[in-house]
Image: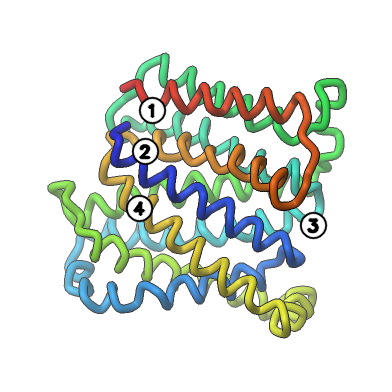
Amino acid sequence: MTITAAILVFISVFMHAAWNLMSKTTQPSTAFYLIMNFVGGIIWLPFFIMSANSFWGLPPLFYWLFAATCVFEVLYMYGLAHGYKHGDISLIYPLVRTLPVLMLAVITLVAGIGKPFGAITMFGMIVIACGCLIMPFQSFRNISFKNLNGIALVFVCLGAIGTTGYTLCDSEALKLVAPDGNVSAVCTLGYLFLMQTGLTLGEVPLVVFDKKEHEAMKNIWGKKIIYPVLAGVVSSMAYALILIAMQYVTNVSYIQAFRQLSLPIGFVAGVIFLHEKSSATKVVGLSLILIGLIVVAFTK
């Protein structure tokens, strides 16, 4: 993993932790994410206008990948929002973030996507996953997933599949935009507009045909509208950095693994700003994530 990619992802994860803190101030819902993604898309419209010619006449595979990434993004947002409704956020979020690390690593290795990585790198990813799983619990004695009911597990799987899918599809789609591997920042941000727009359109039916989402939209539209708007700006900028970072790695699994830095950052932010209590499990989990990140960042 190059230094450039590491720096871009490092900045991105701070933004990712920030918009998640914003989303926690309201009841998680698809309506919240609909507004958030709409705002995120508007930001990149000028870049799409400047780079529109780059997206015409591409191989059919590009358009299939783009359609797939929109579907996977909707799955991720839907799984995350509804997972929070059926389980503790402190357990759901780490699971949704952990599973894709291993899923993406296995898929890229089996399918031969990108440059294969070695056993040491895989070990680092497993260490990261273990750290993510340990962090949510208050102590080592109460490590248990019994609070994760069947419905919550379904939404966790949807969120994890969505994250894995859109990360892989975005990486491959951008390769088709510039086969030589030199995708300009303007094209990358133009692609992000397409992705955010597709995601927004995909979420519209989920809100329109759900009475609970109607109520959520009404609650948000008043004084709370500032939260999804700000979250839209920050989350979209965070993923813009991820898309750019993809151009500097030989295997997209590195990106997915390094993004888990958002968990310890979120932990520190929770302690400082929300006065949440620390624990041995959180410290150990944080340490494992950092060790795993060092291994992944400095191995090939």
Residue 238 relative to residue 218: left or right: left
Please report the residue visible at 65 percent of the width from the left and 41 percent of the height from the top.
268
Q: Which of marks 3 and 4 is in front?
A: 4
Q: Earlier in the sequence, mark 1 or mark 4?
A: 4
Q: Name the residue under label 1.
A: 297
**Tag 2 near tag 1, CB within 8 Å:** yes
Near-viewer residue (155 or 265): 265
- Measured Cα–Cα span from mark 2 to mark 1: 7 Å
Amino acid residing under circle 4: Leu
Residue 187 relative to residue 101: left or right: left
Q: Earlier in the sequence, mark 2 or mark 4?
A: 2
Please report the residue visible at 39 percent of the width from the left and 50 percent of the height from the top.
242
- Measured Cα–Cα span from mark 3 to mark 4: 30 Å
Amino acid residing under circle 1: Ala
Please report the residue visible at 24 percent of the width from the left and 65 percent of the height from the top.
186
- Measured Cα–Cα span from mark 1 to mark 4: 18 Å
Q: Which of marks 1 and 3 is in front?
A: 1
Q: Which of marks 1 and 4 is in front?
A: 1
Instruction: Pinpoint residue 171: horizontal percent, then vertical percent.
Output: 33, 48
Q: Which of marks 3 and 4 is nearer the N terminus?
A: 3
Q: Mark 4 points at which residue?
A: 243
- Measured Cα–Cα span from mark 1 to mark 3: 35 Å
Amino acid residing under circle 2: Ala
Q: Earlier in the sequence, mark 2 or mark 1?
A: 2
Instruction: Pinpoint residue 74: horizontal percent, then vertical percent.
Output: 55, 62
The numbered dot on residue 6 is 2
The numbered dot on residue 85 is 3
Instruction: Pinpoint residue 211: horizontal percent, then vertical percent.
Output: 78, 78
- Measured Cα–Cα span from mark 2 to mark 3: 34 Å
Residue 235 relative to residue 218: left or right: left
